[in-house]
Image (cartoon, rainbow, N blue to C red):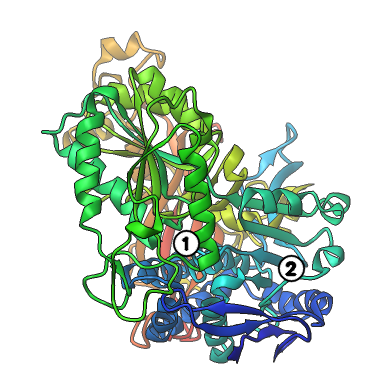
Amino acid sequence: MQQLHSYLSGGWVFGQGQAREIHHAITGEPLYQVCSDGLPLAASLDYARHKGGRALAQMTFQQRAQMMKAVAKHLLAHKEALYAISYQTGATRSDGWVDIEGGIATLFAYAGLAGRELPDDTLWPEDEPISLSKQAQFAARHVLTSRPGVALHINAFNFPCWGMLEKLAPTWLAGMPAIIKPATATAQLTQAMVRLIIDSGLVPEGALQLVCGGIGDMFDHLDYQDAVTFTGSAQTGQHLRAHPRLLAKSIAFTMEADSLNCCVLGEDVTPQMPEFALFIKEVCREMTAKAGQKCTAIRRIIVPAKRVVEVQQALLQRLAGVTVGDPKLEQVRMGALVSREQRDDVQQKVEFLLHHGCEPLCGAALDKLDLVGEGVQNGAFYPATLLYCPDPFSHQAVHGTEAFGPVATLMPYQQSEQAIELALLGQGSLVGSLVTADEALATRFIRATACAHGRMLILDRHAAVESTGHGSPLPMLMHGGPGRAGGGEELGGLRAVKHYMQRTALQGSPAMLAAIGREWVRGATVIEDPVHPFRKYFEQLQLGESLLTARRTVTEADIVNFACLSGDHFYAHMDKIGAAESLFGERVAHGYFVVSAAAGLFVDPGVGPVIANYGMENLRFIEPVKIGDTLQVRLTCKKKIRKPQKTAEDRPHGVVVWDVQVLNQHQQAVALYSILTLVACQEGDVGAVS
C-alpha cells in the first residue's frame, strides 16, 4: 500500500504514528496510508511566512496573475493523470470535469481578472481619493496590502481539486502563501495536483504546502496576520471557529458549511410548460451529480400541492433511468460515494428522516441498488433516493437533517407565501432556485428569501439556454451563505482577494497619497513638458505628467452642428423656450459634445506611440456649459499598467490611464473622467507569456 506524503518546508515527508487508510470507492480495496503524526507542522507555518510569503509579497499583482495562468496551463496539460485518480473517489468523467477542469478554470478566471483590473504593483489603491478639507490639500483613500501571514485551507472531501484551487486563486493573488489540508478520504487527488504544481517549478518555494492527515497543534501557532478557511460540516467548523487562539489573536476565519438548499417550482408552472421539464431536469441532475455529494446540491424540492403527483411521477421516471456503477463505463451516470463510512452516514440520515415525517418514493435502502460493472459489490454505492414529506411545517427534521448523498425530499405548499416560509426554514443556504415564468411571482419570492441565501437562480425557458445551473459556483460570483451555510464568502471575483489582504485608510496630502499609491491623484504636483505626452512611449511617461491645453469657446453653431451630427435634439440643447424653463435657465451644450471638444483639445493627431483609445471611466458632468463659455482641458498621466505579450509577435504595449479635467473660463470643472489608451513600448522588455 502506498504512503501518501505531505509536502512541508520544501520536502515530501510521511508521519510516524498510527496511519489511516484510504480505500477505493468503487472496489473497496485499500489504496493509501495517511499519517502526519510527528511532522514539523508548526515549523511549516514559519516556512510559509518567511519563504513563500516574502517571495509572493515581492511579486506584483500582474506577476502573480501570470504565475497562476502558467500553473493553470501546466495542470491542464496533465489533466488525464488527475482523471485517472479521480475515478478512485467514485467520480464519473463528468463529475471529475467539474472538479479538475472547473478548478483549473478558476485559476484562469482570477488571472484574467487581475490582468484587466489590478495594478502592476504590490499595493492596491482600492478607491478614489476622498477630500477631507476645503483647499483639497488633505485627503484620504483606502489601500490594500499583502498580509505577512499564511492561509490555512481546510477542505472538504467532495471537491479535492476545485475546493483547493478556488481558495488558492484569491490567496496567491493577494500575495499570501497557503497550507492545504485536504479531507483524508480524497487526499490522494489533492496530493497529485499539488505534486504537479511543485514539480513544475512555477511557484515560489513555500508558497504552497500540503498536510495529508491531521493538523495537530497548528492552530496553537497561528498569528493575527494569518487566515483560516474551512469547508465541511457545520459542527466541525463551529468547533474550529471557537478555538482560543483564533479568538485571542482575532484571526480571520471563513466557514462554508453544507446546507439544505431548495428548488421551488412556481405556482404558475404547468406540466405543459418548458419550465416544468427544466425543473425536473435540474432536480435530478443535482441529486445525481457527484452522487449528490455537493454542498450546493438540492435537498428540498418545494412544489405546489396541486402539482405533487405530476412532479413525483416525472422525477421517478427520470431517476429510474440513472445507471449506477463503475464510473469508467460509458453507460454509467452515477458513481459511488467517497467511502463506505460516508455511505453508512447517508443511510443513517435517511432512516432518521423516515422516522420523522418522510415517506420513501424510491431508493432509501442499499438492497434496492442494481449496479453495473465488475468488482463493484464492495463499493460505496447508494441509490438515488427520493423522499416525500406531506407536512413539512409539522415535521422540522426535513429542514435540519442533511443526507450528504443522492437524496432529496419532495414537499408541498398551498400558496406562494408558504413556499417562501419553507425556503426560509432552511435557516441559511448556499443556493436556492426558483423555476417560474412569472416575473411578478419571481420578484415577490426573491425579495422575501434572498436574505437567507448566498446565491439564487431564477430559471425560465430563456435563461435555460445558457444557464450554468443551480449547483455551479462561478469565480466571479460569491460562494457562501448565511446561517447554517456558515456565514462565509468564497470566490466573488476580486472581493475574494480582499479577504486575504489588509485594508488601510491613508490620510495625507495628495502628493503623499500619489507617491505611496504610485498613482497620481488630483491635487498632487504635475509635471509639464514641452513634448506632448501622446508623443511619448510607455516607458517614457511619468506619473503626474500633464498637459494644459489651449482654449475653445463654445458657440451656438457648435451645439446645432453636434445635434445634427448625433441626432440628439433634446430640448435643453435645441429649444430656447423649453431650456429657459428648465433648471439651466438657457440652452446648454450636449455633455458628449463637451467630451468630444475636450478630445479635440488634448489629442495629438500625428502617428505616434498611442495605439488606440481603450475606454472611458467615471464620467461626471459637474457644471452646465452654455453658449459663450470657454473650455480648457488638463490631461494628466494617472496610472500605468504594463501588459504582457501573449505571443512573441505581439507589439509590446501598456495601458495608460489619463485623468481628464474639463474646465470653464472660471477654472471650474465642468466634466471629470478618465480615459485609457494603449501605448506602445519603446523596448520589447514586456516579455512573452508562455
Nearest the camera: 464 or 297?
297
Quarter of the picture containing the N terminus is bottom right
Residue shown at 71% from the left, 38% from the top: 136
Name the residue tied to disc 2.
150
Instruction: Judge the density around disc 2: few (<14), some (14-19), many (≥20) Cα neighbours within 10 Å.
Output: many
Nearest the camera: 660 or 205?
205
Residue 588 visible, this orientation? no
Label 1: which secondary element: helix
Label 2: which secondary element: loop
Q: Quadrant of residue 331?
A: bottom left
Q: CA distance from mark 2 to mark 1?
A: 23 Å
Residue shown at 86% from the left, 54% from the top: 249
**Given this view, does label 2 or label 1 mark the residue nearer the observer?**
2
Q: Quadrant of residue 625?
A: top left
Residue type indicated by callout 2: Val
Residue shown at 38% from the left, 54% from the top: 615
- Residue 12 at x, y percent in the picture: 68, 90
- Residue 618 at x, y percent in the picture: 47, 43
Quarter of the picture containing the C terminus is bottom left
Name the residue tied to disc 1.
113
Q: From this view, report whether residue 271 is shown above or below residue 258.
A: above
284 sits left or right of 125 in the view: left
324 sits left or right of 673 in the view: left
Q: From this view, report whether residue 319 is shown above or below residue 89.
A: above
- Residue 153 at x, y percent in the picture: 65, 65
Residue type indicated by callout 1: Leu
